[in-house]
Image (spheres, rainbow, N blue to C red):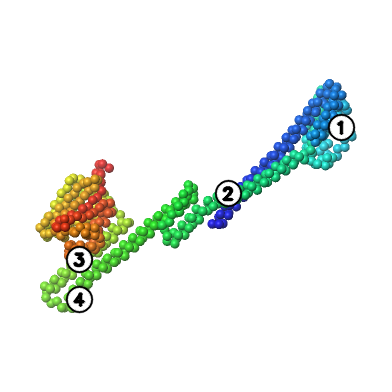
Amino acid sequence: MKKIFWRVGIYFAVALVTLTAVTGLIFTRFNRRNIMGVYKDELKSLARSVSERVNEAMQENDSADFYIYLSALKDFGELRNTDIWILANPTAEEPLDEAYTNVDVKTLNVRENNMNALIQAAFDGKTKSYSGYDGIYEMDMMHLATPVKNNRGENVGVILVIGQMDYRKASVVQYEKYMLFSILIALVVSLVIAAFFSRQLVRPIIRVKEIALRMAAGEYAQKTRIKRRDELGMLADSMDILSEKLVEAKNFRDNLEQNRRDFFSNVSHELRTPITVVKGYVETLADGYVEDEQKRSEYYERILNECAGMERLVSDLLILSKMQNPDFELECEILNVIAVMQDAMRSMRVLMREKGIRAILDYEDECSLIEGDYDRIRQLFLLLLQNAVKYADEDTDIHVRVGREDGQITVEVEDTGTPVQKSEWNNIFEKFYRGNNRGNKDGSGLGLVVARHIVERHFGKIWVTSDEVSRTSFYVSLPEAAAPDEI
């Protein structure tokens, strides 16, 4: 990550310094041209002003006053470090009179081609200028020439203005120094800013990397705690979501593994006793110790009963394992609780007839609807009825009541027989739990556990009450569903 930090910092600093340097170069060139342009305009204005004064003196034939003007012009030029030359045009029909000139073009020794070209252009009626090193002055000078016209418009002379450029170039150099200093300051500032922004950019990346390494080591419950509204914030949110999903997957895997262990543990524990019993009976019969036919038939019947018990146990364990699996999907539909209960009660007629038990169904509304899996709800009611028949006294009634309260459909199954003590009300729905009063009955100890899981998968509740004398009631509460024509 240090490489990213320095790379981003250097890139940012280079970009900022480059931008500052380019901007400074542009402004330097602009300032140079602006300074030279202003100075050129000053010289041009001065040259034209002198040209107009010469033209005015020619028209008024005022050579005496003009001589005074030339003296003042000389003093003005010295004050401004500027030479002002007034030359006559020898090629004109009426060249400028010597009274109005201060330099004789014939005696002027011009060795530079630029100067000759400048003067010649002014003789031709053009205003021209150039700047550069001047051999006469031995320094950089700006030269500007403009024509002098008579009243007929003929170019009779030239005003040549030569000004020093040293102090103006010094201004440009000073400006360039300031610009260079600004670039250096920009470099320092850019490095500080680059370091800050690089840190802001790299810090969440380092945090995400640390979280990823912890998650790779199996520590899935991690949070980045990064709150940003950019791509890095989206990345951090994705890592948080991934962490949550991994935790869920781990819990799911652990639950599956625990269910698998519980399943095998329960099977091995519960099957050990009946298998031992069956093995004992079979060995006794196989060794020929039982010769009485009635006794042998009794042994065979006991073996069949033990096998039937093991079959019920395995079936209940498989159902329980299926209901505990989060991936098991219920085939839900709108069900009438009354119809499902009546179906379950019809299936229990034979068992109830053997004990002389009668089932009575009472309900408030024939249309008591829930949303659920028909097979699972029927199985739930069968388990409650089987439990009631098993522990009810002979020649008694089992009362089944279906009611509605606060958006819930409540089903009560009441039997009269062996009660459930209040201390056992919470434990009776645990696996393989057998109460003190009810422990002498045959069963796998899984029926009510399966019932509880079916109810929970339908977002309901199940509980038991008893007067602890003879009456016991199991209650199931399930969310009520709207009628099809109300949806």
Q: Position of residue 209 (x, y in %)?
A: 49, 57
How far apart are labels 4 and 3 at the CA level? 19 Å
Residue that sits furthest to the top in the current view: 60
Q: Where, by quadrant of the figure, is residue 173 drawn? A: top right
Question: Which quarter shows the N terminus?
Answer: bottom right
Q: Is residue 32 above or below residue 372?
A: above
**Mark positioned earlier in the residue sequence (1 or 3):** 1
- Closer to the chain start, of discs 2 and 4, is 2
Tell us which disc is closer to us: 2 or 4.
2
Disc 1, disc 2: CB below 8 Å?
Answer: no
State how far apart marks 4 and 1 are (Cα): 151 Å
Q: Tell me the residue that label 1 is attached to.
A: 103
Separation of disc 2 and disc 3 at Cα?
Answer: 81 Å
Q: Residues within 10 Å of mark 3 (few under 14, many from 20)?
A: few
Indicate the amino acid at tag 1.
Val
* Residue, disc 3: 308
Mark 1 or mark 2: whose residue is earlier in sequence: 1
Residue 195 placement, left or right of 76? left
Quadrant hosting residue 49: top right
- Residue indicated by mark 2: 193
Circle 3: residue type:
Ala
Measured as percent of width and height from the top left, residue 163 is found at: 79, 36
Q: Which residue is mark 4?
A: 283
The type of residue carrying mark 2 is Ile
Q: Quadrant of residue 280?
A: bottom left
Residue at the location (26% across, 41% down)? 486
